[in-house]
Amino acid sequence: MAKIGVITFSQTLDNYGQVLQYLAIQEYLASRGHKVCLIREYSNIKKMKQFLKRFLLIKNKKKTAVTTFEKWAECTAKYETLHSRQFEKFRKDNCNIYNLQLPSYKKYFDAFVVGSDQIWSSITPYNFLNFTRYGEKKFTIAPSIGKLDVDEKVVSTIRTWLKDFTFITCREQSAVDMCKRAGRMDAQLILDPTFLITKDTYLKFSEQRCNHEDYVFIYMLGADIPIEISAIYEFARKEGLAVKYVASQGREDEYAKEWATVSEWLTLLANAKYVFTNSFHGMALSCIFQKQFLVFPIIGEMEGMNERIFNIAKKFKCEDRIYQDGLNNVKNPIDYGYIRENISKNKLIVNNLLDSINF
């Protein structure tokens, strides 16, 4: 058994995918006999308090330019005070967390992993495991850079950092291309970590209760989509279905919301008749749970986030699940046999990489 420390984003208050991708890494590596811990550089409570204080007070400050992510974070913090989703409680209850300072990491861990989400959107030594000693085992499980174009300055910066990774896998082709430009020609494209565990494993973390009514599950991030939410409600009305709506990361509108915990979110997804989302992880978990789903591509300023959605749709040959001109496509059959085959092949790639280093 090896003790493996994972570096990934882990402070979210409402990003379900961020929590579930770490949970998948933890459960997958644990199934191979390892002890897996989420490494946090700072005190959890202190970090959360700083986050809430910063964004609850931002509206009282004069700012010439507020980024979209800052607006989303302000919205998240506001609703966390009104309707807590208890993300930190879920992490404390279900994730092994080490709140350690950097110099003391080495005495606890045999290997280090950079996890998924857009952890490489921040080009810092920490996110590239530059605190480890040369020759220590370290690898990646599908980190993302969150954008298509990477300039030469970034490539030059990470070239040394990537040299001694045991192996490198990335979630999007753009990240693979970045690594290859930095000299790691062995970098491989794999699926998001959420695909490394099964529906049954996720259900262990759900509420395991059944809803006795048929419903549409809407899961929307704050980014703009090419349709009004009212159209989904109209679809549900015509189908005689209720609506369960979870919004996160800056999504605000007049419709009633479910302020779901992570466990409740999994339950809502598991029991839905149809799923409508603009979220990559909403799409990924819909595939794992074999749901009838439709994904709305993001439009406007944040449309660069679509790469991961288009990549997975192409790989699974389910491009018709991306919204174009109507909602009834959500009813079309999905070749889940083909999708399961691809998920199995992906897991085999990761298994083989770990076998090659005796992990």
Image (spheres, rainbow, N blue to C red):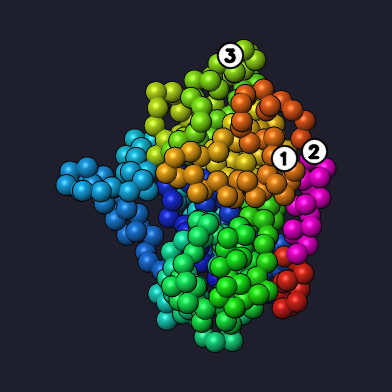
3 or 1: tag closer to the N-terminus: 3
How far is mark 3 from mark 1, CA to CA?
26 Å
Depth check, mark 3 against mark 2: the one in front is: 2
Magenta span: 336-349
Q: Secondary structure at mark 1?
A: loop
Return the mark for residue 335.
2
User: In what quadrant of the picture does the C terminus appear?
Assistant: bottom right
Q: Quadrant of the N terminus?
A: bottom right
| Residues marked 3 and 1 touching at CB (< 8 Å) | no
Q: State if disc 1 and disc 2 touch (CB < 8 Å).
A: yes
Q: Going from the N terminus, do you reach mark 3 or mark 2 first?
A: 3
Q: What secondary structure is marked by label 2?
A: loop
Residue occupied by mark 1: 318
Q: Is residue 248 visible?
A: no
Kindly report which numbered mark, 2 or 1, lies closer to the viewer in this rendering: 1
Residue under label 3: 237
Q: Position of residue 246 (x, y in %)?
A: 50, 33
The residue lying at 67 percent from left, 28 percent from top is: 330
